[in-house]
Image: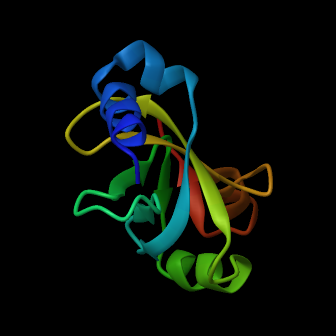
Amino acid sequence: MTLKSALLISLLLASTSLAQSNMISGRLLFFNDEGTFMLDLGLDSPSSSIGGKLSGIKTKEGSAAAIRKLIPKDARLQFKVTKVSSYPEGLLYFNGKDLGAWLVSKGLATRVQ
């Protein structure tokens, strides 16, 4: 990881407008039935991962197992931050597919306002 990469990620997360207009890419470390997840950003530093939560849906039991079956181990996902906070919320994409919408279509989540 270069210093430039680390600074870019710090700026991305610190700026609401930047975070909401860009995608963060990483490998899925975990996803649980509460819709929270962690991505490995691949930066080879102590802070090279980011945690987040799917926004706009409430996941059900079994959603984590379905996500693990869908996503290959080394696949990269994209996280679009929609709510910046210490634990950001947003949309998670795999191969251009919104995983929240996919979970809803499979009956493993419901939409919330």
Q: Quadrant of residue 69?
A: bottom right
Q: Is residue 102 above or below residue 80?
A: below
Q: Residue furthest top?
A: 17
Instruction: Tell me the residue at 22%/63% (across/down).
Output: 46
Asked which quadrant contains residue 89, the reply is top left
Left or right of 108? Residue 33 is left
Which of these two is toward me, 62 or 12? 12
Q: Is residue 96 left or right of residue 6?
A: right
Q: Could you say where residue 56 lies in the image, as x and y percent from the top left?
A: 50, 41
Q: Position of residue 39 (x, y in %)?
A: 44, 62
Residue appearing at x 46%, y 19% in the figure: 18
Q: Which residue ends up furthest to the front in the rendered image?
A: 2
Residue at the image point whose x is 55% and y is 75% from the top: 63
Question: According to the image, what is the colour scheme of the structure?
Answer: rainbow
Q: Nearer the viewer, residue 42 or 82?
A: 42
The image shows residue 64 at horizontal and vertical percentages of 51, 78
- Looking at the rendering, which quadrant does residue 30 occupy? bottom left
Q: Quadrant of the N terminus?
A: bottom left
Residue at image location 47% in from the left, 63% down from the top: 42
Left or right: where 85 falls relative to 66:
left
Give percent across and percent down for residue 13: 34, 31
Residue 57 or residue 1, whichever sits in front: 1
Say above or below: 98 vs 44: above
